[in-house]
């Protein structure tokens, strides 16, 4: 079982490889997202410092989404010279469907075997 992703791995996945500021933000977000994922699965898939590969993928994906929009702004504007770009962004409010499919596979439910 793999360990948690590093901040450098998450930053590279998000397209900001080598950016020290992004890696610093990722380091803080990884711990929060990992705690949320562990709580959602009620600890299933975590054995000390070893994490299920699916959980590592969820943590990487969710942390990368947080890096894209760390303030949770819904309207993002960027200006460079005489040009301005505006776009609507969805803040991190919950797990994505892909993340939920992985998390729900690990989460213990009544009368349902784990992983099945």
Image (spheres, rainbow, N blue to C red):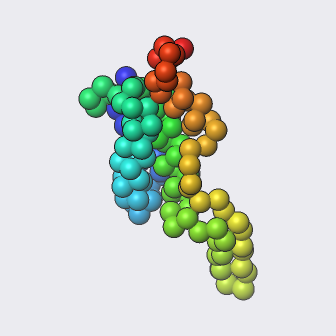
Residue drawn at x 42%, y 44% as measured from the top left: 36
Q: Nearer the viewer, residue 91 or 24?
A: 91
What residue is shown at x 51% (from left), y 32% (from top)? 103
Query: Residue 44: x, y in percent?
Result: 39, 26
Q: Is residue 36 above or below residue 109?
A: below
Seen from the viewer's position, the closer of residues 16 and 105 is: 105
Quarter-wise, where is residue 93 in the image?
Answer: bottom right
Task: Say whether residue 12 is visible.
Answer: no
Q: Is residue 35 above or below residue 116?
A: below
Q: Position of residue 70 (x, y in %)?
A: 50, 63
- The quadrant of the picture occupied by the N terminus is top left
Q: Residue at x 72, y 74 (%)?
A: 85
Q: Is residue 97 visible?
A: yes
Q: Estimate the x, y position of residue 42 in percent, counting from the top left.
A: 39, 32
Residue sitting farthest toward the bottom: 82
Where residue 22 appears, as percent x and y from the top left, is 44, 59
Relative to 74, is 66 above or below? above
Quarter occupied by the C terminus = top right
Residue sitting at x 35%, y 48%: 31
């Amino acid at each position: 079982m793999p360990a948690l992703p590093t901040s450098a791995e998450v930053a590279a996945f998000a397209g900001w490889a080598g950016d020290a500021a992004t890696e610093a933000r990722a380091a803080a977000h990884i711990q929060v997202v990992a705690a949320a994922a562990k709580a959602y699965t009620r600890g299933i898939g975590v054995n000390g410092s070893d994490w299920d590969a699916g959980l590592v993928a969820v943590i990487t994906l969710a942390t990368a989404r947080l890096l894209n929009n760390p303030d949770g702004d819904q309207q993002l504007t960027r200006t460079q010279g005489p040009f301005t770009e505006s776009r609507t962004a969805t803040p991190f409010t919950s797990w994505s469907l892909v993340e939920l499919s992985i998390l729900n596979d690990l989460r213990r439910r009544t009368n349902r075997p784990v992983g099945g």
